Image (cartoon, grey):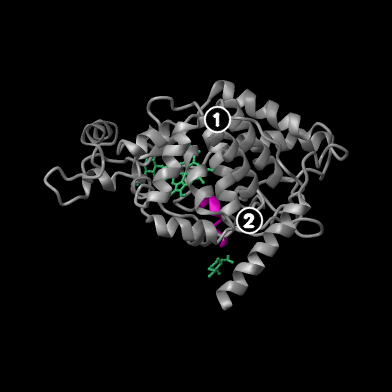
């Protein structure tokens, strides 16, 4: 009963929140806001297309921890380690400087009007669009939160070792469905992973080959060249591999195809095939890529509404890295 009640409250919060955000929110408050973000994002991506993935993940990690409130952007302060310094986010999360530049430009024309949380949501959309996915309308009007606590990342961001059941539980606790999980997981078609996020599958297994038997052996061999055994090299902190080695910067269904072929980097990839329903969703997305892109846009909009602060809650930060004093 308690859990049903909690679920109802959560659903209520999400429905309320979704009616509080609006598409074109800044049209009469700061007309150029979305255009400035897109210009800044595209400018950065023209030099480093890989950053597109950074913005998408930034939005995901923002929304899953304390809701989409820009808490992921806050810097640590003495005695208060922030989300961005969690090992889940540091050194892998990227794109902060671009968000800062967009924010500074926007502040210079409309002071204290556009939230950092909205800028992240716009940048994620622009990153998808730049990579060849569809551009979609982003409901806006989020306020920025006042708290960022490193510990929250461990309890709210699912690790790549999670089982399907754990991933689904994580998503439903945020008001997202199993289908949203599968749909959004396709974002791994762009970007990179640090070796440290999956090298336990290459070296820590007790089998003769010392690698995860569920990983395609020739792919494992290739990955071992890119990611040497951490016990024999000095420091693998910054080694990365593309998540979709075929088209690393293109928003397509190749990551799903990799999963079907046992070429997903993470244990959490394989686990998505462990139920017929989720396996079928993956096959359907591969068969109908355009439909997947639309579903992706819809799920991003849904994710973008998790526990948002609106109205008098929170603030519009002047500097995305610190709360207003
Ligand atoms: C559901 C569970 C998920 C798990 C376990 C997971 C896990 C991971 C891991 C381990 C990485 C590599 C980080 C690194 O070592 O550099 C990564 C990267 C990434 N993830 Fe996920 N992820 C999940 C869901 C999502 C969702 C929902 C999205 C977006 C909607 C997303 C978007 C990305 C992107 C774009 C990257 C590449 C980042 C970059 O290149 O900077 N992920 N993910
Ligand atoms: C962060 O959250 C943890 C766990 O809820 C709590 O123990 C800790 O005091 C918080 N840190 C700060 C600085 O508030
Ligand atoms: C790895 O090297 C970088 C500098 O290249 C350093 O910042 C980091 O602390 C090192 N990590 C370890 C575990 O030694």
Q: Position of residue 153 (x, y in %)?
A: 51, 57
Residue 83, labelled with which disc?
A: none
- Does dot 2 land on a helix, a strand or a loop? loop
Mark 1 nearby-residue class (10 Å; few <14, some 14–19, many ≥20): some
- Does dot 1 land on a helix, a strand or a loop? helix
Which is nearer the eye, 235 or 83? 83
Magenta-tinted stretch? 79-85
Task: Residue lying at the far left in this picture: please name it.
Answer: 208
Q: Mark 1 sits on what residue? A: 290
Which residue: 65% across, 62% down?
11
Residue 146 part of the magenta-drawn span:
no
Q: Mark 2 sits on what residue? A: 67
Residue 82 part of the magenta-drawn span:
yes
Q: Position of residue 145 (x, y in %)?
A: 69, 56
In the rendered image, which quarter is residue 174 located in? bottom right
Q: Position of residue 284 (x, y in %)?
A: 46, 38
The C terminus, quarter of image? bottom right
In the rendered image, which quarter is residue 113 located in? top right
Q: Say if 290 sits above or below 153 in the image.
A: above
Task: Residue lying at the far right in this picture: please name it.
Answer: 28
Mark 1 lies within 8 Å of ligand 1 (Cβ measured): no
Query: CA–CA distance between discs 1 and 2?
Result: 29 Å
């Amino acid at each position: 009963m308690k859990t049903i009640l909690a679920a109802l409250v959560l659903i209520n919060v999400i429905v309320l929140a979704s009616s509080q955000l609006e598409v074109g929110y800044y049209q009469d408050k700061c007309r150029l806001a979305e255009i400035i973000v897109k210009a800044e994002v595209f400018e950065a991506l023209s030099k480093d297309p890989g950053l597109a993935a950074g913005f998408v993940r930034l939005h995901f990690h923002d929304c899953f921890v304390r809701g989409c409130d820009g808490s992921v952007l806050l810097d640590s302060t003495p005695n208060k380690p922030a989300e961005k310094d969690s090992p889940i986010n540091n050194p892998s999360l990227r794109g902060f400087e671009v968000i800062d530049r967009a924010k500074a430009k926007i502040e210079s024309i409309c002071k204290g009007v556009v939230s950092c949380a909205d800028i992240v949501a716009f940048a994620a959309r622009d990153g998808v669009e730049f990579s060849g996915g569809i551009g979609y309308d982003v409901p806006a009007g989020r306020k920025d939160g006042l708290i960022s606590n490193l510990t929250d990342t461990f309890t709210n961001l699912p690790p790549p070792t999670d089982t399907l059941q754990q991933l689904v539980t994580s998503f439903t606790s945020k008001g997202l469905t199993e289908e949203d999980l599968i749909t959004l997981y396709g974002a791994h078609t762009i970007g990179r992973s640090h070796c440290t996020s999956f090298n336990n599958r290459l070296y820590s297994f007790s089998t003769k080959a010392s690698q995860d038997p569920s990983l395609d052996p020739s792919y494992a061999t290739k990955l071992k060249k890119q990611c040497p055994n951490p016990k024999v090299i000095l420091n693998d902190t910054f080694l990365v591999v593309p998540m979709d080695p075929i088209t690393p910067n293109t928003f397509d269904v190749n990551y799903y195809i990799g999963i079907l072929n046992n070429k997903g980097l993470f244990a959490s990839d394989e686990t998505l095939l462990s139920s017929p329903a989720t396996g079928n969703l993956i096959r359907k997305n591969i068969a109908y890529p355009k439909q997947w892109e639309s579903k992706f846009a819809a799920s991003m909009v849904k994710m973008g509404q998790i526990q948002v602060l609106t109205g008098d809650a929170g603030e519009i930060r002047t500097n995305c890295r610190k709360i207003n004093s």
